[in-house]
Each structure stands twice: as structure tokens, then as C-alpha cells.
Amino acid sequence: MNGSRRRDKKRHSIGSRLSPYLFLLPAVVFAAVYFNYSAIVTLYYSFTDWDGINRPQFVGLQNYANIWMDGNFQVSIINTVIWVLASLLLPVGLGLLFAVVLNRVRWQKVFKNIIYLPHAMSATASGVIFAFMLSNNGITQLFDKIGLDQLAFNWLQQPPFHTIAMIFTYTWQNVGTNMVLFLIGLNAIPKDPLEAGLIDGATGWKMFYHITFPLLKPITSVVVLMSLVNSFKVFDTIWVMTTGGPYRSSETLAVTMYRETFVMSNYGYGSSIAVVLSAIIIVLSWAYLRSTMKAGDA
Amino acid sequence: MTMRKAVRAFIYALLALLSVVWLMPLWFVLINAVKSTRGFFSGEIWDLPEQFRIWENIRYAWVEANIGSGFLNSLLYGVVGAVFAILVAALAAFALSALELKGRMFWFLLIYSGTIFPVQMYLIPVFKMYAEAGLYDTRIGLILYYIAICIPFCLFVMRNYFMTFSKEVAEAARLDGCNDLGVFVRIYLPLAAAPVSVLFLFQFTYIWNELLFGMTLSRSADVRPLMAGLANMRGLYASSNIPALLTAALIASVPTLALFSVLQKNMMQGLTIVEKK
């Protein structure tokens, strides 16, 4: 009687000591299977030659050596760099510009909602819409009619215009988020430095460059980092609009990884592209975070 | 002063022009999605529709092109995936912020590590695992993946939120005989309605819009989520039934546009949570 009660108490105390870990368990299982295990396995596959059916053959660094000789990969890398730079210029740069202008006009809300509206649609739906607009059945007819016949061709069939067209689509869809974040940042700026600037005679561009922009820095660094990481991963827009074509000329790393793996059944090679993509993103975000934090200390 | 007025007028004119350009694609989609196929191909895209065939196009997209089943699938994935991801993440966040355990930072980083890599790093093993476990092309397989991918961000937000709670409340409840689960269900969860609703909005939208895993992990129309179905339809109908394709793109955008218009204020404020990520 006495002994069993003591055992109960003991069990209870073990139970209550274990209980916190039981709360963690479901999340840890999901993360371990889907993220940790998967990432390690992808790394392993990247050292193999594998068609997805037979057993993977270990080939060491062969895939990584092949990557740099692969013409398709080179095109893909160049396109990815274009995407990354353009998305810093357009969705981020325009987002900042729109926010600064909208911050000082009436009907801010109306304009803000119009610019943000496409972001309430998916990249896939936007891709379908712009692919239609840019096809022979679309807006190109209008270009022809109003005498801009140099613009009246099928944009999605023509390098480098297909990449430009897709970057416009991406901008149309994404500039709204950046603009809203910049507007939040602008609203949070204290009025004193701005007034001090006015007293010192700063106006317009000077005011923006010397006072507003430095005060916006925390939000700018977040927006730039998010845009950097996301632009490396662009897949939906390209897959829907050109599937990376024609002749693989509009692929980026994310699309090349998918095509090599699931269309051409080069699972090992596809894995090595996934690893390269991950490495680039992690190194760049780390370097960017480090540099902004350092600048923040100074 | 007149100079300033001129600048002002110029800026408004530019903004008006910008708004027109921004809305133009949607205008073209709207007027062409209601045309009949013949009407579309015999006229120009800027012609206003002569007959309204929108019901016919909706029926075609919904039934013939399987957008209907994709719509219902994505509704299921979005709701169930978001709810369970938030629940699992909230349980873990509660343990990490209110309970005694060792290696808090280790556990947090283990779960949060999902956001470090791009999803491409997980795609091939998950696909292979699913093929072997019989989860490929099943609804439960997609739901499990969507729960997993939404957990890290939910954990981050919920943990930050629970950290602001004072531990004394939980202590008092425990003295009254509440166990850990009781404290979580009766005290922590009811107080977290605000972050939970913002998270639901974001995660539902994420799942609704997701394409890559949706198209990789499914094959049949019964399982395929909406965006994978729409991408598929674009491949099949890009040069034949364009009005139905545009109708499908609109159907696919209805829930997220509705959420946006009803909750635009929360959504934009919610961005401040994302921004802290």
C-alpha cells in the first residue's frame, strides 16, 4: 500500500519532468523528418549518380565538377544573378520610391491598395495572367495597332526579353509588400530629426538622403534580405510562364534543379544544384547580416 | 508657390497613370474571362465582350479542367495545415517559454532550422520518402508536408508572444491544481487569439499559393492542389480555351482577394510580424 503510493509519486514526478518534452515532441518530429533528415539526405544524394530508380552510385564530387562544365547551368546562374539584381532594383527600389511618394499624398490608402492588390493573388495566377498578356493573343496586338511594332512579338519566346517580362510580372506582384513595409518604417520615424533638418535648410532629395534614408535603415535591411533570399528561390513565375524555355534559356537555379531531377531523372545532379543554391543563399545572407550589424555598431 | 502646385499636380497625374497601368492586366483578364472562345478569337483583347459566357467558362474550368477539385483540395490543405501547424508550434512555444527544460536554445534552433535552407533542399528526399511510404499522391501526405513547412515561422511568432507572459499566472494556476496541459489550454491559448489569427491568415495564404511541392507530390486531380492544377491547365489550354483559363486564374484568386479585402488592415499590420522574422 505504502510502497505503491510512493511509486505513484515517483512516477508522477518523472512524468512532470518529462512533460515539457512531450509538448516539444510533435514539432521536433516534424522538423527532424522534413528538415534535418531531408537536408542531410539531399547532401548525400549530391555525391551520387542516381536515376531515381536503381540504387544511387557514389561518385564523390563528380556532380560538382560537372556543374561548372554544364552550359545549361551557366545560363541558369547568369539568369539567377539577373533576377537577384533586378529584384533589388525593381521590387525593392520601386517599393521605396512608392512609399516615399505615397507617404506625403492624400488618398494614400487608395493608391496603396491598388499597388498592393496583385500581392493578394498567387505567383501562379499572376504568371497565367501575364503569359496571356504577352502572348500573340494579348497586349502585343495593341502594340502593333499603335505603331510600336518593335514591341509586337511573343515576349516569352525571345531571350532576354522573356526574363525581363517575367521580372516585370514578379515586380507587379511583389512591390506592394515592400512598399507597405517601407511605409510602416516611414511612419515610425520620429519627427524631431526631420524638423531639425528643415531648420538646417534640408529639403527634397537632401532631406531624404541625409536624414530619412539612414533612419529607415532597420527596415531597409530586412526588406533587402528578404528580397535577396526570395529572388534566389523564384520558381512559380518562371515555371508557369515559360517552364524555363525556350531551350532552357530562361531557367534559374530553382527551375534547373526541378528540371534535372523530375523531368530528366538526374536525381544526384539535381541534389547537387539544390546544395549549391542553399550554399549561395546561406553565405550571402550571413555576409549581408554581418555587414549590416557591423554598420549598425559603428 | 505655383511651382509647388505644379509639382503636386504632376505627382498626382503620375500616380493616376501608375494606378491605371497597375490595374490594366486585371481589366484585360476581367473582360476576356467572360467572352466565349469564338468571341475571344474573332475579336481583339481590348474589345468589350459581346455576350457574357462567364457561367459557361466557370463550368468548364471548374468541371472539365478540374479546377473545382483543386479548389476544394486547397481549401482542405490550407485550413487543416494552418490549424495543425499553429497548434503544434504553440505547444512547442509553450514548452520553450513557460516550462522547465534543458537546452531551450538547442530545441528552438532544431525546429527553426527549417527556415535556414531553401525548400529545394527538402524536395527530393520528401518525394522519395513519400513514394516508399505510400504517401505520394495522397491528401494526408500533402497535409503533413504543409503542417511541417509552416511550423518554424509559427513557432517563432508564438514563442516571442508567450515570452511576454508573466510566469506568476502559470504558477498560480498550478497551485490551484492545474497541470501543464491545463495551463496551456486554459490560460496561454485563449490569450493568444491575436497572433493565432494573423498566423492563420498568413499560413493559409502560403499553402493556398504553394506550387512546387503541390505539383511534385501529387499526380491525380483528386489530390492535386489548386495552383498545381492551374499551372497544369495553363500548359494544356494556353492557346485553345483562353477565356476558361483566365476564369480559372480568377477563381484561384477569389479566396485570397476576399481575405485581403475583408482583413486588409490586419494583413498590413500583420506584415510587421513577418518583418521581424
Image (tube, coloured by chain):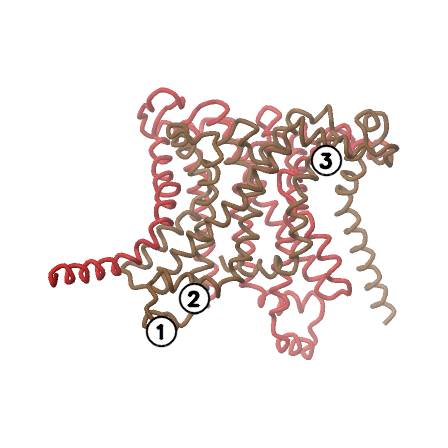
**Mark identifier at residue B187:** 2
- In the depicted view, which residue is nearer to us: A285 or B232? B232
Along the line of sight, the residue nearer the viewer: A4 or A92: A4
User: Pointers 3 and 1 in contact (CB under 8 A)?
Assistant: no
Q: Quadrant of the N terminus of chain B?
A: bottom right
Q: Quadrant of residue A100?
A: bottom right
Q: Residue at x 68, y 57 (%)?
A: A97
Chain with brown colouring: B
Say which amino acid is labelled 2. Ile
Q: Which residue is mark 1?
A: B172
Q: Residue at x 48, y 60 (%)?
A: A292
Using the numbered discs, state the Cα–Cα distance from disc 3 to disc 2 in whole angstroms.
46 Å
| Residue B271 location, quadrant | bottom right
Q: Residue furthest front?
A: A1
Q: Which residue is mark 3?
A: B247
Q: Nearer the viewer, mark 3 or mark 2?
A: 2
Do the residues indicated by labels 2 and 1 lie within the same chain of the protein? yes
